Amino acid sequence: MGKAESHITNNLRALRFNHGEMTQLELAEKVGVTRQTIYAIEKNKYSPSLEVAFRIAMVFEVPLEEVFKFKA
Amino acid sequence: MNNSFKENFQWVTLISVTAIYGYYFAKVIPTAGPDITVDQIALFGVLVALLVVVHIIGAMVLIAAARFQDPTPDERDKLVNLMGRSSASWMLAVGIFAGMAAAWFTEGNFWVMHVLLASLVLSQLVESATQIFHYRRGF
């Protein structure tokens, strides 16, 4: 079941891998969402709110645009 | 498991509401008269109680299965919930107009009550199905 193509992509999988293979659950707990929401973001099935996007960037200590990219 | 507690609970609701109210309508509609009978009200009461018990047991099982996860809804759960309720409100509005038509065109209270009950049931099914759809498809 595919959704309409999103213009937002992300590097969550790579960032988790580069941060000691952080699990989806660990990231979810740090960000304050469910693990399923992290999974949905990684699979481009959900575009998070600006607040959650910033929280994810803060966990990895990188600018927001290193986590999410917008393709017009 | 990549389904959230909320998504799994919507499956419990969808299946249990379909089965329990499906049974109710299958038993009651063939015996339709002008007015609701005491037996029909008693059956309705028993089935509503059964539905509540099924939901409580379903929630307990799902919470136990997801013991390492917080079942508190996050922002995605809240958005999906809103989309489900939006779809359900349309079904409910249609049902209210159908109930008004039943009040106008039929004798007694049987059809009015059951059209309104059917609209409540269908709106719940639409809400659960819409939520499951958005959880699986993404948005």
Image (cartoon, coloured by chain):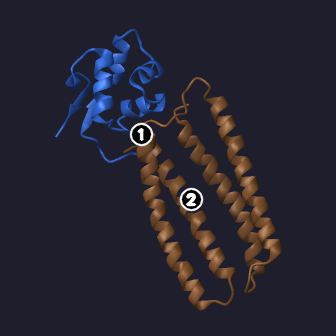
Answer yes or no: are tags 2 and 1 on the same subunit: yes
Seen at 71% across and 70% down, the residue is B25
- Considering the image in quadrants, where does the C terminus of chain A appear? top left
Estimate how packed mark 1 is, as few (under 14), some (14 to 19) or many (20 or more) residues with alpha carbons within 10 Å: many
CA separation in Å, label 2 and label 1: 20 Å
Label 1: chain letter: B
Identify which amino acid the numbered label 2 is placed on: Gln
Q: Is residue B17 above or below residue B115?
A: above
Identify which amino acid the numbered label 1 is placed on: Arg
First of labels 2, 1 by sequence position: 1
Which residue is identified by label 2? B124
Residue A29 is left or right of residue B102, and the answer is left
Q: Confirm whether residue B105 shows in the render.
A: yes
Label 2: chain letter: B
Q: Is residue B73 above or below residue B126?
A: above
Find the residue positioned furthest to the right: B39
Seen at 45% across and 66% down, the residue is B90
Q: Nearer the viewer, residue A2 or B129?
A: B129
